Image (cartoon, rainbow, N blue to C red):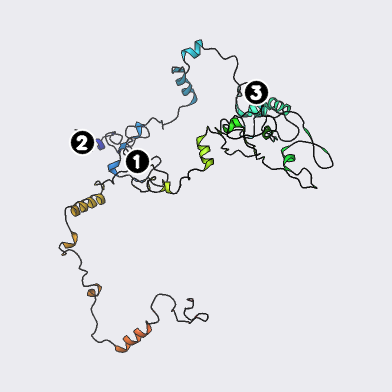
Amino acid sequence: MVISSTILSSPDGLNSTLHDHTHKGTGQAGNKSLLSYRHDIGIPGYTGFISNAHSVAVPIKGNTQYIGKKADNNTFDKTITNLVQSETKSIYSKEFAKPPTSSGRSEVGGGYWIANANNRNDKNTKKFIAQSTYKAEIQESSKNAEAALSQTIIPGLRFTRKSVAPDKDVFEEADSGYNSQLAYQTEYSNMRMNDPLTGKTRSRVAMSASEGEVAGGAASASKDSFGGLTATTKFDSSFKEFQLGTTKGTSKIPGYSGFIPATDNNTKAVSQARSTETRPNAKNEMLLFSLDQYSRDSIPHYRGFRPQDGGNIKPHKPPSKETTQGRTNFEAAQAVANGCNFNDGPRDHFRSSDKGIMSFFSQGSTYVSENGTAYAERYYHTLRPKEGLPRVYYPSKTTLSGYKFAQ
């Protein structure tokens, strides 16, 4: 057994590691930090108060992060050279596997109505091997620019087409309607008036039905619905990766990329289009039977969604007995649970308040002025002390009954 006085009196007593409060620097054995770690309910990022009953003392030296002095570059390089180099590749990929001779076409589009010009006509079949975005777009942008300029179509936008048939890279000449000037056929020329004098207009969206193979034979439509190009019309979805189930059997609206229910394969779309059932009420689904709106194990400053699960419904924990206040509350709760009533106990050690506050004062004389009482009652009948301005009755000038606003 070592006596503490002997340790403190010795030259090395102050630097001893026998005491937990001795601090010898970061990363040393004497640095015991009582960091509280919540082992029962983990709260990420919560640094508030945690009672002693729910915490475990974790020393700093138990972590894997080095917080001491960093080594210089020479020491770091020597240490790295002595380490065993780890092999990240397998034996097959390192010895037997051969690099591919060709790569597949990159099927990456630009969205619903914006296509990637580099992917047309198999012009871009190489993988992206640039070292950085700066090198690919700034230093080597001439290749992509030449490919994009060679594929640019002169008459207007690329994807404003007049039918659902595949586009043809030809210049379609049409009469503009104004002094018989030569113009190219565009979506705008189909929508505007053909003859300004007669006022003849065309429908903005052709109300044409889909073909029989799309509607399952239920509808019959002429070939003019698709401009006489039904043989070349593909009824697959134009948004295969986005809108599964939509079809080309309907006239497209320029710029519209929404949902078009026009196939029997998508049962939800058909049922929604027929409107046979009412839509579910989202407000009723957010009531108490689907959301947990009670704060049981509350997380500070967290107002997110908590699913209603049996694991989330937990009873409140008993008060902690480690602190003075917690011990007092625990003993009081146990006393009440055992049938103890604190109001029925003796009041010898309590200040009696039954007589009221006037029991602390005594009258100077038994004489009471009647005039003073009368004046006081008359004065305080219209003016009460310390409550602002007096409220004097002013009759209303506009109504029979009422009161003027307080001044």
Label 1 to label 3: alpha-carbon separation: 52 Å
In-front residue for pair 291/354: 291
Classify 10 Å Cα crowding around label 2: few (below 14), some (14-19), many (20 and above). few
Q: Is 242 displayed left or right of 44 in the figure?
A: right
Label 2 to label 3: alpha-carbon separation: 83 Å
Q: Nearer the viewer, mark 1 or mark 3?
A: 1
Q: Are dots 1 and 2 in contact, CB under 8 Å?
A: no
Taking 297 as reference, is 157 above or below it? above
Of the image marks 1 and 2, the number of the one nearer the N terminus: 2
Residue under label 2: 3
Q: Are dots 1 and 3 in contact, CB under 8 Å?
A: no
Residue 221: numbered disc: none
Of the image marks 1 and 3, the number of the one nearer the N terminus: 3
User: Three-letter amino acid code at disc 3?
Assistant: Asn
User: Three-letter amino acid code at disc 2?
Assistant: Ile
Location of residue 66 in the rendering, given as x and y in whole percent from the top left corner: 41, 30
Instruction: Please say whether residue 354 is visible from this viewpoint.
Output: yes
Location of residue 380 in the rendering, given as x and y in whole percent from the top left corner: 37, 81
Of the image marks 2 and 3, the number of the one nearer the N terminus: 2
Residue at 42 percent of width and 46 percent of height: 285
Residue 124: numbered disc: 3
Taking 198 as reference, is 19 above or below it? above
Residue at 23 percent of width and 72 percent of height: 356
